[in-house]
């Protein structure tokens, strides 16, 4: 029987200005499962995924492999949950690509050779070998996305979380990044408006609106429900429309 990778019970979150961003969220994601979170702007998708590695934390309503996401557990949680931000500039802040990737492990790996090896392995995996000395902010948006993903790989996360992974990518970069995400055989949570990508990558969908989960179900069943999608500001993927 598969383990529960993520368990959320009765999670509510209100921003300091009084905006209720999440309202009584209950969710389970199993080991190896890919879950897509969809919904219109302001539905609460990004706020929800920021709770998965403790960037936002209301209480112990969120558990990662049965470990509550609390302050004392944050170091362990952040090894288990790798988060790739929508904007790679929010993730890349060191002088070079090597420094960005080494940042998370340099204090943990005393052996410098081991750090170099892990950085090289991460870059090779994302197809960016040879970029070690490049300046991250001089790269294209698609290259930055790949480097952002590479920064979390040396920690060997058990769960990958993506916020709008295909936004602002040209068609070729989008296709390559989807292929990269698909290659991971671990739990994945993907928040996105790109429903064609969600259709391709996700086993199930969590549909959100105004901070609440509207429904959870199998990907095709939800994405074929045009009435439901329209009610919550979304459209059926063109590929499913064409199937009739």
Image: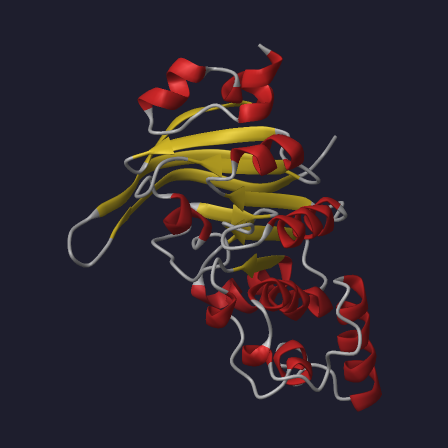
Using the image as rendered, state which of residue 227 and residue 115 is in the foreground.
Answer: 227
Res 12 → quadrant: top left
Residue at point 72%, 51% (across, down): 180
Q: Quick check: 67 left or right of 232?
A: right
Residue at point 79%, 83% (across, down): 116
Spot occupied by residue 79 in the image (x, y as percentages of width and height): 63, 64
Residue at point 19%, 48% (across, down): 19
Using the image as rendered, state which of residue 222 and residue 171 is in the foreground.
Answer: 171
Res. 29 in view: no
Res. 222 in view: yes
Q: List the single residue furthest toward the top.
A: 244
Using the image as rendered, state which of residue 69 and residue 183 is in the foreground.
Answer: 183
Specify the quadrant that holds the N terminus: top right
**Vertically, is 135 above or below 199?**
below
Res 215 → quadrant: top left
Q: Quick check: 117 left or right of 105?
A: right
Spot occupied by residue 214 in the image (x, y as percentages of width and height): 37, 25
Spot occupied by residue 222 in the image (x, y as percentages of width and height): 51, 20
How many numbered badges does the structure rendering display?
A: 0
Spot occupied by residue 118 in the image (x, y as percentages of width and height): 79, 75
Using the image as rendered, state which of residue 23 and residue 118 is in the foreground.
Answer: 118
**Vertically, is 21 above or below 240?**
below
Residue at point 45%, 60% (across, down): 54
Specify the quadrant that holds the C terminus: top right
- Structure colour scheme: secondary structure
């Amino acid at each position: 029987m598969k383990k529960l990778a993520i368990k959320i019970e009765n999670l509510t979150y209100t921003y300091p200005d009084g905006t209720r961003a999440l309202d009584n969220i209950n969710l389970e994601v199993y080991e190896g499962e890919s879950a897509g979170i969809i919904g219109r702007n302001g539905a609460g998708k990004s706020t929800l995924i920021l709770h998965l590695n403790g960037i936002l934390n209301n209480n112990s309503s969120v558990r990662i492999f049965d470990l509550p996401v609390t302050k004392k557990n944050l170091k362990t949680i952040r090894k288990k949950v790798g988060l790739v931000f929508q904007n790679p500039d929010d993730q890349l802040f060191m002088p070079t690509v090597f420094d960005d990737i080494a940042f998370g492990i340099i204090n943990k790996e005393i052996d410098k050779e081991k750090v170099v090896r892990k950085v090289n392995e991460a870059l090779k995996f994302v197809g960016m070998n040879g970029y070690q000395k490049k300046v991250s902010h001089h790269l294209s948006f698609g290259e930055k996305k790949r480097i952002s993903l590479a920064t979390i790989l040396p920690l060997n996360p058990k769960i990958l979380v993506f916020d709008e992974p295909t936004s602002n990518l040209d068609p070729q970069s989008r296709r390559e990044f989807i292929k990269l995400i698909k290659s991971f055989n671990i739990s994945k949570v993907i928040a996105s408006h790109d429903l064609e990508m969600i259709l391709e990558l996700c086993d199930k969908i969590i549909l959100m609106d105004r901070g609440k989960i509207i429904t959870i179900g199998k990907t095709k069943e939800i994405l074929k429900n045009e009435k439901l999608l329209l009610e919550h500001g979304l459209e059926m993927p063109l590929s499913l429309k064409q199937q009739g």
